[in-house]
Amino acid sequence: MIMIKNITVIGAGLMGHGIGEVFALNGYNVNLYDSFPAAIENAKKSIDNSLSRLLNSGKIKKEDLNEIKSRIKFHGNLDEALMDSDFVIEAVPERLDIKTSVLSEVSKKTDSIIATNTSSIRISEIAEHIDKPERFLGMHFFNPPVVLKLVEVIRGEKTAESVFNEVYNLAKSIKKIPIKVMKDTPGFVVNRISGPETLLFCFIYQSGLAKPEEVDSYIKAQGMPMGPYELFDYVGLDVIKDLFDYYGNELSQDYKKCTVISDLVNSGKKGMKTGQGFYKWENGKALIPRANPSDKINLMDIFALEINEAVKLIEDGVATPEDIETGVKYGLNRPFGPISVAEGLSNREVKDTLLKLYEMSKFETFKPAKSIDSGNLKAIIHKKISVPEVQEKKNKYIIEEKNNRVLKLLLNNGKNNLITKELVDELNDEIDMISKNDDINVVVITGRDTFSAGADLSQFFRNSADFMKNAERVERVFDRIRKTGKIFIAAIKGYALGGGLELALACDIRMATRSSILGFPETSLGLIPGYGGSQRLYKLIGMSRAVSMILTAERITGERALDYGIVNKLFENDDEVMTYAVDLSERIAPVSVNLAKKLIYSEMNFDSGLDFEAAAVGVLYSTDDLREGISAFLSKRKPDYKGH
C-alpha cells in the first residue's frame, strides 16, 4: 500500500485551490502550484475567505486555523512543488491540449501517482501523453470542492488496480463520497447523465419551441433554484460549447447539431462572465423576463433522458446502479438520482417518452437504450440480468416473437416439441424475464405445427429419486405461470399430450384448433401425469371427466375439449390467436390481472377469499389504471393502462 502524505495540486484556479484546501483540512501537506503569480495571489485570498466562513459556521476550530493554513505552500516553480510529493492532481483549464502539455511534463519529473480533475475528457486519451500510464487516473471533484461531497474516481484503460483502489481510499480519507467509474467514458457518470437533457434544452431553444424564460419558469416551478438557461449562463456558455464539441466527437454527432451555443460564444456572449448570454446579467444576477411556464417540456422528459443515459452506463459496464444513484445525488446536490426515479416508473412510460423525444428531434441520443427497448429496465437496474443476457442470449428450444405488449413463445424442440430439461430451463428463464418486464401484458405459448406431444421419455435419469426431482422441478416451473401477474394463453394445435397438456393446463386461457388432439397417455405407458395434470384437470372440468381422461388415456379433439371446458376458444390460424392476444393486452389493466390471478388461484376458504377480494378492490381503488379505465369507458375510447 502506498502511504500518501504530501499532495501537489497543479493549477491554483477555482477548482485547484478548493481541492488543495480540502486536503489541508483533512491533515495532508499541500503544495499548490500555478505558473501565473496572479492566480497564486487570488488562491491565497480565496482560501483565507473560505476558512473564515468555515470558522464562523463552527466547522473548524479557531485553534486549528493556523495549522490548516500552514499545511498549504504556494509555488510558482514546478520542480519545488513536486518535491517529496506522494500524489499529484491536475486542475488546469478543461482543454485537452493544455492538460496533456502540463501532465506530460509532470510525469517526467515525478514517480508519484498522478490524477487529473477533468470533468469530461477520457482518461485514456490523456494517458497517451503520460510516462508510466499505469499510475494515472481521474479524480473528479465537484464545484465547490469544499462543499460538495462527491468525487468520481475514474479508471483509465492502463490504470493499475492498486492505484485505482488507493485513490478511492484517499477520497474517503478526506471525508468525500467516492464512486468508482470502472470504465473510461466521456463525461464519466454525472456529466454524462446531464448531457442529453442539456442537448434537449438546446434543441428547444434552437427550434423555437419555447423561449428560455418560459422553460426556466417551468423548471423553477418544480422547485429547482435555477432554470437550465440561467444555469448555462452561470456556468459559462464557452464551457457548454467545449463540452458539446467534445461529446460531438466522442459520443454522438447529435451534439454538433446544436449550433446556437457556438453562435452565442462566437459573438462574445458567454453568459455571466461577459454580462450577456441567453440573458443579460448585472451584478451577478440574470435579468430574466417574466414568462408563463412552458408546456413544451415536463419533468418526465428530463427523467426519461437521465434514466436512459444511466442504463447505457450500466450496459457499458461504466458504473453500478448504486454508484450512479450516489453520483447524481451528491454531484448535483439532489435528494434522489435516476435509479430511484426509475423504480417508480414503468418501462413503457420511459420508452414512450424517449420515442416521443426522438420523433421530435431525430437525435439518436434520445433513442431508448437496449435494455429499455427490450422491456428490461427494472431487471438491469436491479442487476438481475447483464446486458449480454438481455441482448445476446439465444434460446435453442423457445423462440421469442414480440408484438406490441404480447410476447409469443414458440416451442422449438423438434417435430413433436417434447418437454425436456433444457426446454424447461429456457421456459423458467423466460418467466424470469416476463415477470420483470412491465412492457408485456400477455404471453402466448404455442408450437409451429404441434403444441407438444409430451415429455421426452428417452432422457437419462440415474434413479427413481432423480426422476422424482425432475418432476418436482417441472411442476414448480409450470406453477410459476399462475403466480406471474400476466395473462398466459396456450394456443394448441396438433398434439397436446401428457406434459404438453400439463403445460397448457398451467396457462390461464387455452385456445385450440378443432382438429387438435389432447390427452393423457401416461397410464397406457405405466406412468401417471407427473407435471401437475392430476391436480389441475379435475379442478377445471370436474372429477368424473378428469378420472375418465386420466385412467383410460382417452384422447379428445379440440372441439370436444371446448365442450369439456378444457379449452376456452377455438381458432383457425395463428393470426387469429395473436389478434385476440393483442386486443386483450390493450384493454385489460395489468394491476387488475395480477390481483385477479392471486384471488382465482388461491386455496383460501370462502370467507377468507371474500376478505382478500375486498382488500384487493380497495387497493385497486387508488390506482391510476382504475381512473384511466373509467375515463376511457366514459369517453368511449381504448384505455392506455400503465400498470400502476
Image: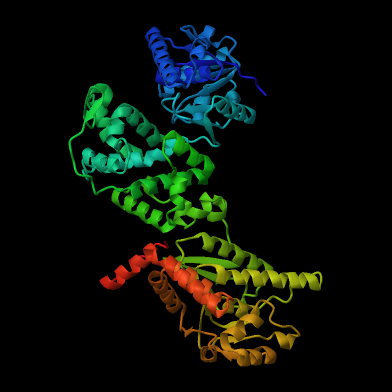
Please state if 515 lies on the left or on the right of 527 as rendered: left
Q: Is residue 180 left or right of residue 583?
A: right
The answer to which of 634 and 41 lies nearer the viewer is: 634
x and y percent of residue 123 in the render? 51, 29
Residue 74 place in picture, x, y as percent: 47, 8
Pick whichever, 403 or 70, lies toward us: 70
Q: Is residue 278 above or below residue 427?
A: above
Evaluate whether residue 36 shows in this view: yes
**Residue situated in front as seen by the camera: 589 or 95:** 589
Q: Residue at x 43, y 40 (%)?
A: 335
User: Residue 270: percent from the left, percent from the top?
Assistant: 27, 26
In the image, what residue occupies the spot 30% across and 32% down?
232
Label total for image: 0
Residue shown at the point (41%, 15%) measured from the top left:
52
Q: Tell me the quarter of the picture where residue 466 sits.
A: bottom right
Residue 107 versus residue 197 in the image, above or below:
above
Image quarter of the C terminus: bottom left
